[in-house]
Amino acid sequence: MSAGALAEARSNPSTRRQDILDAAETCFVRNGFHRTTMQDLARQAGMTAGNIYHYFKSKEAVVLGLAEHERARGAALVADLARAGDRRMILTGIIAQHFAEIPREVAILRLDLWSEATRNPAIAAMHERFEEEGRAFFIDLLAGLATSGECDPASLYETMDALMKGIIVNRALTPDYDPAPAVAQLHAVIDAGLAGRLSKSSKPDGGASR
């Protein structure tokens, strides 16, 4: 066994999995899901092509693992914000981290994942689960922040969701995109919705159907 292979074998499995996920993020942003091979991932992660299959059985498994990792990072952010402040600080922090300050590479990866969900049933099921979890989380958060009985948290979330997805798409597609105006609009919509002043004209077509 070579020195490199021995070092690889002795590596902590969780550390190696993370190395692969970090490599996948780099490769997927650079080449997209379909043009990236398992050999590309192994090379980027600094391991042998054969050994990568001990951690992930397929490229689809890597994609699912990367999405789960991103979800875990989001949950950790929410937990940190919850310890540091109130519901409004949680909402403001999420918007800042995931939309106002989102790196273009992360936006590209998110857009590629959405595209892949239109073709791959496993990724589509994962995406749907994450969407429903996010929807339930935001609706509960908004209900606790409502300042008027006229606030409709579900409808407010649908409007927010359209704006938030728009920010991610524009960030991915436009290198010099400035999300600040869209984020300001998002905050204005939230304030109006919580106060029960969200007009029907500001809601996305299709209402709250999902």
Image (tube, grey):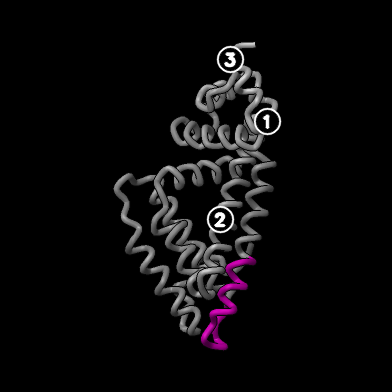
- Label 1 secondary element: loop
Q: Which residue is the extreme one toward the top?
A: 1
The amino acid marked with disc number 2 is Gly
- For label 3, the residue is 3
Q: Nearer the viewer, mark 2 or mark 3?
A: 3
**26 inside magenta stretch:** no
- Label 3 secondary element: helix
Q: Specify the segment rendered in magenta.
A: 136-152
- Picture coordinates of residue 103 (x, y %)? 40, 48
- Which residue: 51% across, 37% down? 25
- For label 1, the residue is 55
Residue 188: image quadrant is bottom left
- Picture coordinates of residue 58 (x, y %)? 67, 29
The amino acid marked with disc number 1 is Tyr
Tell me how far mark 1 sits from mark 2, CA to CA.
23 Å
In this rendering, is residue 95 above or below 110? below
Q: Nearer the viewer, residue 158 or 63?
A: 63
Asked whether the beta carbons under mark 1 and mark 2 sit within 8 Å of each other, the answer is no
Dot 3, crowdedness within 10 Å: few (<14), some or many (≥20)? Answer: few
Tell me how far mark 1 sits from mark 3, CA to CA.
20 Å
Q: Which of 170 and 140 is in front in this view?
A: 140
Q: Which quarter of the image is occupied by the C terminus?
A: bottom right
Q: Which quarter of the image is occupied by the N terminus?
A: top right
- Picture coordinates of residue 97 (x, y %)? 45, 58
Q: Earlier in the sequence, mark 1 or mark 3?
A: 3
Q: Is residue 157 left or right of residue 13?
A: left
- Which residue: 63% across, 40% down? 65
- For label 2, the residue is 74
